[in-house]
Image (tube, rainbow, N blue to C red):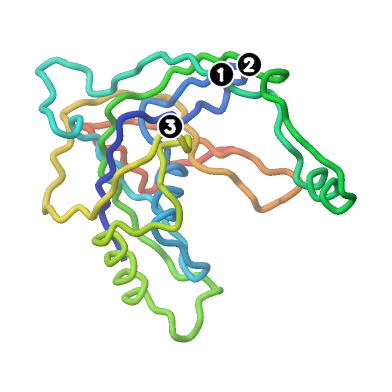
Amino acid sequence: MSIRIEVWGDYACFTRAEMKADRVSYPIITPSAARGLIEAIYWHPGLKYHIDRIYLLSPKGRALKEGKDPIRFVNVNRNEVSEKLNNSEAMSAINNGKKIALYTSQVIQPRTSLILRDVHYVIEAHFDMTDKATPSDNPGKFQDILRRRLERGQCYHTPCFGCREFPAHFREWHGEEVPAVKYSQDLGFMLYDMDYSDPQNIRPMFFRAKLVDGVLDLRDCEVVS
C-alpha cells in the first residue's frame, strides 16, 4: 500500500559516502534518508518501507524564480568533536564507581560542510509485510495508523534531513498531482542503502540517480555495491 508524505525544512545534509573530512551533501534526499524519515514517524517490525519516487518541489512558502536552480547549496562552518564516549567504557566506569568525561575543548575540530538550503520534497513510498507481523496485523491497519500519526504530527523521534540538527516538518500529501519543478539533471552515483546481510561486512549500495522533470524515480533502479 502506498502513501505520499510532504516534507520540508530550512537545511539538510545527506553526506556523500566518499567524503571523509568535510561533509558534502548529495543534491537531493537519498532513498535511505527518506526511509529513515518515515520510520521516525511510524515504525513496526511487521512492515518494511520502500521508496518509489521523490519529488523535488519549490522552496516552501515562495515561488521559484524562472531560471533559478531549485537545488540550493550553502557553506557552513561548525565545531565538532573528533572522539565520542564508548558505551562499554561508560558502563564499566559506572559499575566501578569511576567518572568518565569528554572534554570538548581538547578534542574540538572545525569542519566545513556544504549543505542544502530550503528543501521541500514529496516522498512516495509503499510498504510490504514482513515475517515479524502478527496474525492481527494487516496492511490496512498499518496504513491507517501511519495516516493518523501524520495528521496529528506524531513521531517516535523528530524526523530530520540527514543530521539531527536539521529537523524536518511533515504531513500527508493529499493532492492528486505533485507540482514538481521542471528540472532535470544526472546526479551521478548516489547512496541507495546499506547492506546488513553480513553483520561483519556491512556494505554501501549505490544507484545511478537521474532527476527527470523534478522526479527521482526509484522503481526498478539498478543497485550495485
- Name the spot of residue 107 as percent of width and height, x first: 70, 20
Q: Are marks 2 and 1 in contact (CB under 8 Å)?
A: yes
Against 215, residue 219 (above or below) is below
- For badge 1, the amino acid type reads Asn
Residue at 13 percent of width and 39 percent of height:
179
Instruction: Identify the residue position indicated by label 2 in the image.
Output: 109
Mark with earlier residue (3, 2): 2
Q: Quadrant of the C terminus?
A: top right
Instruction: Identify the residue position indicated by label 1 in the image.
Output: 79
Against 203, residue 71 (above or below) is above
In-front residue for pair 190/30 = 30
Mark with earlier residue (1, 3): 1
Residue at 36 percent of width and 48 percent of height:
219
Instruction: Identify the residue position indicated by label 3 in the image.
Output: 208
Mark with earlier residue (2, 1): 1
Indicate the secondary structure of the residue bearing disc 3: strand
Instruction: Kindly give the residue lying farthest to the bottom in the view shown.
Output: 135
